[in-house]
Image (cartoon, grey):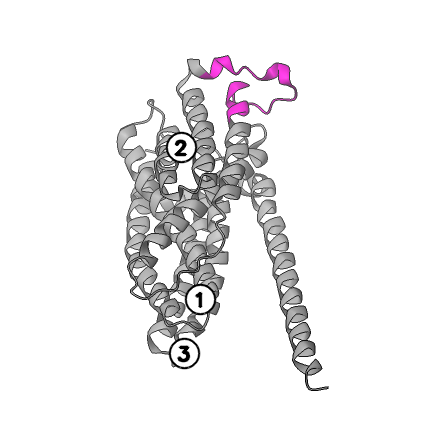
Amino acid sequence: MTSIRPAAGAAEADGAAHGTGTGRAVAVLVLVALAALIPLFGPSAALHGTGEAAAPGAGGIALLRGVLFAALCVPLGELFVLRLARRLPGAPAGRPPSWAPAANAAGFVAALALAAVVSAGNLIPHGPGQIDVGGLYDSRDGRLALLEVNAFLLAGLCALARRPAAQVWPLAAVVVAEALRAHPTTEQSPLTGSGLTLVHLTCASLWAGGLLHALRTVRRWRGDAAGPLLLGLYARVAAVLLAALTATGVWSSLRRMPAATVLDQLTTTAYGRTLLAKVILVAVVAGFALWARIRLSRAADPLTAYAPARAEVTALGAVVVVSGLLTAVPLPIRWS
């Protein structure tokens, strides 16, 4: 009889773990579905009453941009945290399974769909006949779209070939392409705008993707003292990333909306409303981050910081989705 009890206890533990895993999977699917509603219905909500016209398929474009940004965050965040973990003496050898191959595959599909839109004259193609692949080479936007497609493909191959560090170069190419795409040559000082976007997107990817992988790593290391140390090391770097994000975000916004018009445009234009939503979300993220840092430094058990940090990464996911929406709404008018 005594030999049966441990087996029964183990079975109960396995069942509980399986139930917990299923619950997490369902929660993730629900969050992903809710996140998809933001770009799909966001353009009409942001444009309501502004008198501005949405580009055709703005909801779909926003969704694809959100997927592309998320796909960029995951592998860059993994590489970032793996580098931090190597700086911890005596850290466990175990690492959570990489999500980079799946993320790069999602990024490839999103980039391919966006390239199809560019090839159809920035319209949603309704058939293969409307897609002009050769025409992509004739325009700046087309070449940048092709660069992103090939970069995600190469990054995915690097991840599958167990050469994760090599992903950094094609992923960096995606960041550069996005920075250039966001600021056409007809814009005033386009290189300044591209430089700001380059820093902003890099810091955002490292912050969001890094926190996600740090939490996954800490969960894998549960019970080991290296977990809180990794979170603390990430927190110090994240503070710098937040400062850079804030500075580049404010500067970029003032380039699009001069200081004298910001308050009006934040409520009367689709771009301003979406930007305001993003700012509010970032403030919420910063609040969760501060809560997690306080628990990490003052609580008797530093791992109590895990709960607010998990809320932080969920809010960061919403920021990424809203960032995709921000690229799909009309740019604000530079009032004099």
Element type where label 1 sits in the image: loop
> What's the residue type where badge 1 is placed?
Trp
Image location of residue 264, percent across then percent down: 41, 44
> What's the residue type where badge 3 is placed?
Asp
Element type where label 3 sits in the image: loop
- On the image, numbered disc 1 is attached to which residue? 221
- On the image, numbered disc 2 is attached to which residue? 333
Which picture quadrant has residue 334?
top left
> What's the residue type where badge 2 is placed?
Ile
Image location of residue 79, percent across then percent down: 37, 48
Task: Say which label, 3 or 2, has the lower sequence index.
Answer: 3
- On the image, numbered disc 3 is attached to which residue? 301
Tell me which segment is drawn in magenta: 115-136
Q: CA distance from mark 1 to mark 3?
A: 15 Å
Q: Nearer the viewer, residue 225 or 38?
A: 225
Q: CA distance from mark 3 to mark 2?
A: 51 Å
Q: Residues within 10 Å of mark 1 (few under 14, many from 20)?
A: some
User: Which label lies toward us, 1 or 3?
Assistant: 1
